[in-house]
Image (cartoon, grey):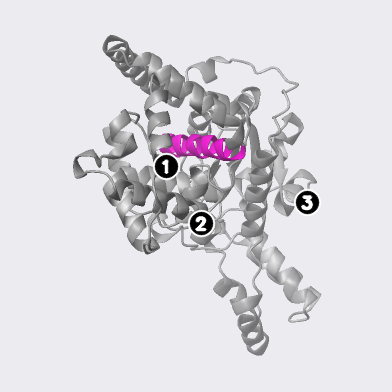
Amino acid sequence: MNPIVFCGPSLRAQDIVPYNGFEFRPPVRQGDLYAATRGGPRAIGVIDGYFDGQPAVLHKEILWALTRGIAVFGASSMGALRAAELHSFGMRGVGRIFEAYRDGEFTDDDEVALIHGPPETGYMHLSEPMVNIRATLDQAVAQKVIDMSTGARLATSSKARFYWDRTWLSLLADVGDPKKAEELALWLRTGKVDRKREDALELLKEIDAFVRSGAAQAPPDFHFEWTENWHNAPWRNQTASIDAKATAEEDAILDELRLRGDYARLRRDALLRLLARGEQAAPDRQAIKRAMGEFRSRRRLMRQADVVDWARENGTDIAAIERMIGDDAVVETLARERDAELHRAILDRLRELGLYPGYRDKALVRQRSPSLSAPVPRALIAVWFFERRLGRAVPRDIDDYAISIGLPGIDRFYDLLAHEYAFTAGRSTSDDSGLTGENGLT
């Protein structure tokens, strides 16, 4: 399963775009990390989390995830706090804020606290976290915008405020000298330091590197105590109840497959995915984009709302869809890497299905057929092949499509199409159904 990252105001929308293989969830609250662990991701990242007015994520949830072989990373905000408290148990802290808490430079939770708007506003900042104020004042002193004593005084006055009331306007009001306040305000337009964002971005890079390396989380060296409070946690039991309901429904569907004779075939397909996961292959982001595009185009899911509706109709969620797409990307990546090795196995499978003689006979006939006397425009022949023969839209990247079917590139693909077009043109209209339909292999 793809890495899961809990984040909110510490990152901007554009920051997560490069990590389309990750599942991003809202700031973590109590029970959320436990629920994420049940899905079995390779890694969980904690950046932002709720604490004021909502129960915060428990240390025990993180410890439980570690005992399940899941790497848990923390940075920036709630993640930095929990990582400082649990790094000796195996949680991985990232960034300067984590280091400051770990080393005792920071001791108060309010250093990272802020008030922000709802997700619909992009978690708009309504106050400024103290760690950003400190980093910005240090930068202003280093660039001689203010002197060291002014920087220390402004840090002290900001710290004295309740975290809801820490803003750049309130800081500027504390400067005292209107001219210096104006100079600082002008500098702040481009000079502000967002330490929480810097650390959050570093966490994403660390998780990405961990996943790509294929490394495994080291077994914990502590014993997880199954306490009464843990056993009776309402969110834990609620998750188990939902899982039990889903399991009963899924068992009934599997029985239906058995009764209709489809179970064995689908089990073989599922085994391929399972074996591919075991290879710990890390598809590049382009492979994931291809798999996502193929998944959506085949089902005509043009909008994100269509994807959500499809997930609901099929008794699943977006996280599961992303897992399926990730599996498809891994399988396709491995298939491309080992295409030549698979040729004999493909032919053996044709023999097993009883289709080998039909394909062989048609291949021999095609080899003896004449070539076109004049070249056909590539755009025309592409439309003929994809829309008429395959019943699908012409791919945006035909070169990539050629590689996906085991060809070295687009030129070889069009040579093949031209020969097929000439072969088909010489056949009767009644025999123009194509190899796929004639042989029954789908």
Q: In which quarter of the image is residue 351?
A: top left
Q: Report how far apart the C-alphas of labels 2 and 3 lie in the structure.
A: 62 Å
The location of residue 117, given as percent across then percent down, is: 43, 58
Q: Is mark 3 on a helix, strand or loop?
A: loop
Which mark is first along the chain, 1 or 3?
3
Compared with residue 357, is residue 41 higher up or lower down, i.e. above or below?
below
The location of residue 28, given as percent across then percent down, is: 51, 41
Point out the stretch of residues depicted in magenta.
319-337
- For disc 1, the marked residue is 368
Residue density around tag 2, few if under 14, some if 14–19, many if 20 or more, within 10 Å: few
Main SS of the magenta part reads: helix
Residue density around tag 1, few if under 14, some if 14–19, many if 20 or more, within 10 Å: few
Q: Nearer the viewer, mark 2 or mark 3?
A: 2
Q: What element carries label 1?
A: helix
Q: In which quarter of the image is residue 60?
A: top right
Q: Is mark 2 on a helix, strand or loop?
A: helix
Q: In the image, what residue occupies the spot 37% across and 35% down?
A: 317
- For disc 2, the marked residue is 411
Specify the amino acid type for callout 2: Asp
- For disc 3, the marked residue is 105
Compared with residue 131, is residue 355 higher up or lower down, i.e. above or below?
above
From the viewer's perspective, is 341 left or right of 410? right
Which mark is first along the chain, 2 or 1?
1
In front of the other: 168 or 246: 246
Specify the amino acid type for callout 3: Glu
Q: Report how far apart the C-alphas of labels 1 and 2 lie in the structure.
A: 21 Å
Mark 3 in CB contact with mark 1 (< 8 angstroms): no
Specify the amino acid type for callout 1: Arg
Q: In the image, what residue occupies the spot 45% across and 56% down?
A: 397
Mark 1 in CB contact with mark 2 (< 8 angstroms): no
